[in-house]
Image (tube, rainbow, N blue to C red):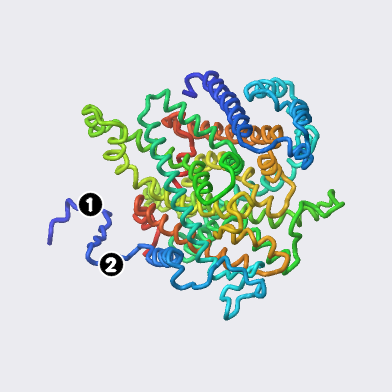
Amino acid sequence: MSDNRFTLVGMRPVDKQSPQNTKWYKGKPIFSIVLFLIIVLGCLFCELFIPQDPTYMDLYNANIAPCKKFWFGTDTMGRDIFSMVWYGGRISLFIGFFATAISTSIAICYGAASGLAPKWLDAIMMRFTEIFLSIPELLLVVLIQAVLGDANVISITFVIGITSWVAVAKVVRTEVLQIRNSEYVIAARCMGAGFFHILNKHLIPNFMSSIMFMVVMNIRTAIVYESTLSFMGIGLSTEIISWGSLLSLSEKSLLSGSWWIILIPGIFLITSLLCITDIGNYLRDRKKDINGIKRLFCRK
Amino acid sequence: MINKNPYLYYSRKILIFILSVFLLSIAVFYVARLAPGDALFSYYGSRVEKMSPKERERAEKKLGLDAPIHIQYIRWLENAAHGNFGISFKYKTDVLEVIKERLPNTLLLGGIGFLFIFILSPMLGILCILHNGKWLDKLICKVGTIISCIPEFWMSLVLILIFAINLKWFPSSGAYFIGREGDIWGRILHLILPMTVVIASHLWYYAYMVRNRLLREIGTGYVLLEKSVGFSKRSIIFKHCLRNVLPSYLSIMAISLPHIMGGTYIVETVFSYPGIGTLSYESARYKDYNLLMVLCIMSGTVVILCNIIAQIIDERIDPRIRESETARIMEVSDV
């Protein structure tokens, strides 16, 4: 009999998970990634499988429900929705990614500057973000859009980019506040490193994981934003095909009862949003492992 | 700090509040006026195009648009201090009158929507926690994620398509049947669809947050102790965990109040609901300066006020939180 006197009473055996047993894809959102890749690649290379021009207006075949010839039907101007959806995805995804790139770079610079700045400057910068946030977002977009003139893809990207950086900037600042006094940053500063050097070498690698989720979610928000703006008539005009401008036609189609003009582009839009959300959720869960906590309440 | 000197603490907060509103008004005033576009157009309509330069000058003088911007601002501030916010260029009556007409509609839509979200999201979160890891939790999580992904305008359109056009259960636009403004039943009928969109698009965000916070609370040491003592799951969650989660939930809901109430633009536009949302959208688009100013300051004030309330709640719960660190950080990094 072995000596039991010094083992802890009531200690639960820790289930060991050997890394070899878990498959590489376990817990990863493979389905969403594949689906999203299909959508992205399909939009990028849509010329290859869609021979007809999406802007071609076939007035004889206007407003036709989905059938063999027009898989997704045609809109009120006789354009084929199947090809429009793929072509439109290009612009919507472009706006999503680039607007996020703009907002993220602003957020990182602003947040890091605010975190590294002396206390009084930091306070002023944070006040500024609060005032910025207190202007209703839509009004801000309308006003900035008016300054930029007529809406096109670049200006919409820019407007969405410069209005959606605040939340990320705040997180960056909190993270930077924690890192700024660590030895390696002080050492780098003593050696005369500039702002951008510290940012690149020391700060970004440290806080990237905590803003990654929000950045991915910003892609989603930007795509939604573009479609909402186009729908309300302050975004892209109906000649530039995007998911938003496609959907902006749908208010008219309510009257004629052509459901496919509303549903099909919307389902495309939502599917890609869902994929992005799923990927984003995975990135967040990997950061804070809630699974360990979950186990407590699961009776096995 | 709050315990050391409450007077100093609150007067500081009030000072910050006033300063923020003041800066906000300057920002909105400048941005609105710098944007190109003819403000006269919203007052005179298409007559503007036929005006001679002299008439234009006179018209600009009449509306007070001829002076440099900073003088216009000082003039506006003086008038505002006397309670005179100017006239709306489009409606040609006092700005406050125009707002007074529309405000109750938005308060009704946003307020009741907020109440529903406020009550339903903890309930949904707790439901998820009680069934944690089982099919119900997974189902709610999946459905919630899908619904929260749907853009508001699209959801509105689909609801109109299904319930207003195909089934003809609810009217598709407006806030009341024409000519029957006092009809309460009519109002309710008009509210149901927009309200559904407002609630559905926000609910999961907060419910999920409650769920995650409770989940984290369950992982702490005292819950393990209580479990080992033999408390039931329900009593641990309702009596202990919930109590710890509640204050931060309140502070987040304080921030979300203006967000939900003011975020009804899109819904109002799609349903042509006569509320503040459509009004401010119009005023920004057609350069109705005076109206825009008041609307922006109004919503901005509510946002800033709610932020300060959330801050106070947070600092009461956890005095270690530094003042400038708003609850918004917790909100975004958490969900």
- Residue type indicated by callout 2: Lys
Give neighbour class at mark 1: few <14, some 14-19, many 20+ (Cα, 10 Å): few
Q: Is residue A142 above or below residue B169?
A: above
Name which residue lies at 42% across and 28% down: A122
Residue B259 drawn at (x, y percent): 59, 43
Q: Is residue B64 above or below residue B250?
A: above
N-term-proximal mark, 1 vs 2 = 1
Q: Chain of mark 2?
A: A
Share a chain, discs 1 and 2?
yes
Instruction: Give the residue at the far right of this rendering.
Output: B179
Name which residue lies at 49% across and 45% down: A158
Q: Which residue is mark 2?
A: A23
Q: Chain of mark 1?
A: A
Of residue B126 and residue B321, the one placed in the foreground of this image is: B321
Task: Specify the label residue B263 is tagged with.
Answer: none
| Labels 1 and 2 touching (C-beta < 8 A) | no
Residue A119 drawn at (x, y percent): 40, 24
Indicate the quadrant where residue B250 lies. Answer: top right
Quarter of the image containing the C terminus of chain A?
bottom left
Residue B215 drawn at (x, y percent): 43, 51
Of residue A218 and residue A49, the one placed in the foreground of this image is: A49
Name which residue lies at 56% across and 22% down: B15
**Is residue B137 at least partly visible in the picture?**
no
Q: Secondary structure at mark 2?
A: loop
**Is residue B188 at least partly visible in the picture?**
yes
Residue B30 drawn at (x, y percent): 60, 30
- Residue type indicated by callout 1: Leu
Q: Secondary structure at mark 1?
A: loop
How far apart are the two marked residues, 1 and 2, measured between alpha carbons? 34 Å
Name which residue lies at 39% across and 67% down: A34
Indicate the quadrant where residue A77 lies. Answer: bottom right
Q: Which residue is mark 1?
A: A8
